[in-house]
Image (spheres, grey):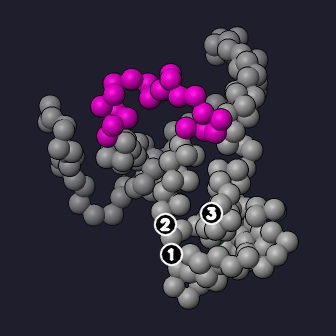
Amino acid sequence: MFPNSEHRFCVRHMYNNFKSEHKSFLSNKSCGLQPNVQLSKGPNVFKVVERLKLESSVCHPEYSGNFHYQVRGPGDDQHIVDIDKKTCACNRWQLIGIPCIHGISAPLSSNRDPIDYIHNKYKKENFIKAYAPVIYGINGPMMWPKTNDKPLECPLFKKQIGRPKKAKALQADEVRV
Ligand SMILES: [Zn+2]
């Protein structure tokens, strides 16, 4: 239907990738919501921080003063971290709001909790605020205002180069009908 779309946007491939990455999610046979989760941060943030804590063991922070750290590692890498402004020279912290391994290692070295350095957008109360407004329903196409524009049409069919496949490659859990 969309001959120019790339392979990775195919819904079947996206579903198969999702299935292999989130096996436990699908085996739950639920909508994925966990009703008893009561966290001050979003449910996945704690897991991410715990993983980053382990990964940050290769970093060696040295306190320079005024909330600045010079973090060596991994390897010969070296970054400046400012835990007051929540920034790291690698920019990951600024981009996603969760400290990178350099940013995690700095507060850990001063016995501070890295969870306190996560951006406020991950806080539960901000999640609730973001989804608080009501999304109202809309009327069907019969009620939409008419325009004089041409209706949208399907894209033109373009024959692909090469011999077309005769049969779809099935996944392990799919049955040929
Ligand atoms: Zn960093």
Q: Is 124 one of the magenta-colored residues? A: no
**What is the distance, in whole Å, between disc 1 and disc 2 at their CAs?**
7 Å
Residue at (76% x, 22% y) in the render: 133
Task: Identify the secondary structure beneath mark 3.
Answer: helix
Residue at (78% x, 79% y) in the render: 64
Within-10-Å neighbours for mark 1: few <14, some 14–19, many 20+: some
| Residue ID for mark 1 | 58
Quadrant into which the C terminus falls: top left
CB within 8 Å, label 3 to label 2? no
The quarter of the displayed image where residue 159 is located: bottom left
Question: Looking at the image, is mark 1 or mark 3 earlier in the sequence?
Answer: 1
Residue 128, percent from left and from top: 70, 27
Question: Looking at the image, is mark 3 or mark 2 earlier in the sequence?
Answer: 2
Quadrant into which the N terminus falls: top left
In the rendered image, is residue 103 in sight? no
CB within 8 Å, label 1 to label 2? yes
Residue at (56% x, 88% y) in the render: 76
| Residue ID for mark 2 | 55
Residue at (33% x, 63% y) in the render: 161
Which tag is nearer the camera, tag 3 or tag 2?
Answer: 3
> Over which residues does the magenta segment extend?
23-43
In the image as oriented, which residue stretches furthest toward the bottom?
A: 76
